[in-house]
Image: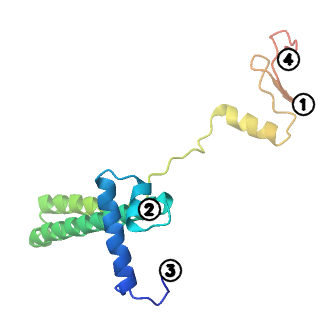
Amino acid sequence: MAGRGESKTSPRRVEAQIRAAKAVRLRADGYSYCEIAKELGYKNGNVAQVIVTRTLAKVRSESVDTMRRLENRRLDEKQEVLAPEIRKANLAAITVDLKVQERRAKLNGLDAPAQIDLGAKRPFDSLLDRWMAGDEAANLGEEAGSVSGRGLQATTGAGEDTS
């Protein structure tokens, strides 16, 4: 296991990274995880699977970060070109700059997720709230049923209990 103070470029870590890269290559060549473990000296196929999965996740993450940096540089360049026209209050340049800013916010996850108001009340909700609070006077009417402390009971127009 790596010590907390161990350098990322220590011989042991470099060797582990080389083995992990070999494991990914073998997996891409169709080797099973058990075969990879046997070939590279891992304890078992499960260990080989974890190594391959972590290595691929790290590569994907690094690729995404690299692409994000590149796209941010491109957006910077666009804004630099727009800057003189924005200073002149050119409406078209300002509009394009706002689109560039929107793209940057999306790219970097700066926009808060949209929130949906699930608290909108319907007419029935206030009666239900009163009933849940124990208000015996909350009455849903004969056609919809009546509410009592015992629960919701459907009634007919003649007031008969149909429960």
**Marks 3 and 1: in contact by CB < 8 Å?**
no
- Can residue 38 be seen here? The reply is yes
Is tag 1's residue or tag 4's residue first in the polypeptide sequence?
1
Provide the residue designation for mark 2.
48
Report the colour scheme. rainbow
Quadrant of the rendering where the C terminus is positioned: top right
**Of tags 1 and 2, which is closer to the observer?**
2
Q: Nearer the viewer, residue 35 or 57?
A: 35
Picture quarter containing residue 89? bottom left
Is tag 2's residue or tag 3's residue first in the polypeptide sequence?
3
- Disc 1: CA contacts within 10 A as few (<14), some (14-19) or many (>=20): few
- The answer for how far apart the CA atoms under marks 1 and 4 are is 12 Å
- The answer for how far apart the CA atoms under marks 1 and 2 are is 61 Å
Provide the residue designation for mark 3.
1
- Residue shown at 44% from the left, 52% from the top: 114
Is tag 1's residue or tag 2's residue first in the polypeptide sequence?
2
| Mark number, residue 163 | 4
Q: Amino acid at mark 1?
A: Arg
- Under tag 1, what secondary structure? loop
- Disc 4: CA contacts within 10 A as few (<14), some (14-19) or many (>=20): few
18 lies above or below 37? below
Q: Residue 101 placed where, x, y %? A: 25, 63
- The answer for how far apart the CA atoms under marks 2 and 3 are is 16 Å
132 lies above or below 161? below
Provide the residue designation for mark 1.
150
Q: Residue 128 placed where, x, y %? A: 75, 35
**Marks 2 and 1: in contact by CB < 8 Å?**
no
**Of tags 4 and 3, which is closer to the observer?**
3
**Marks 3 and 4: in contact by CB < 8 Å?**
no
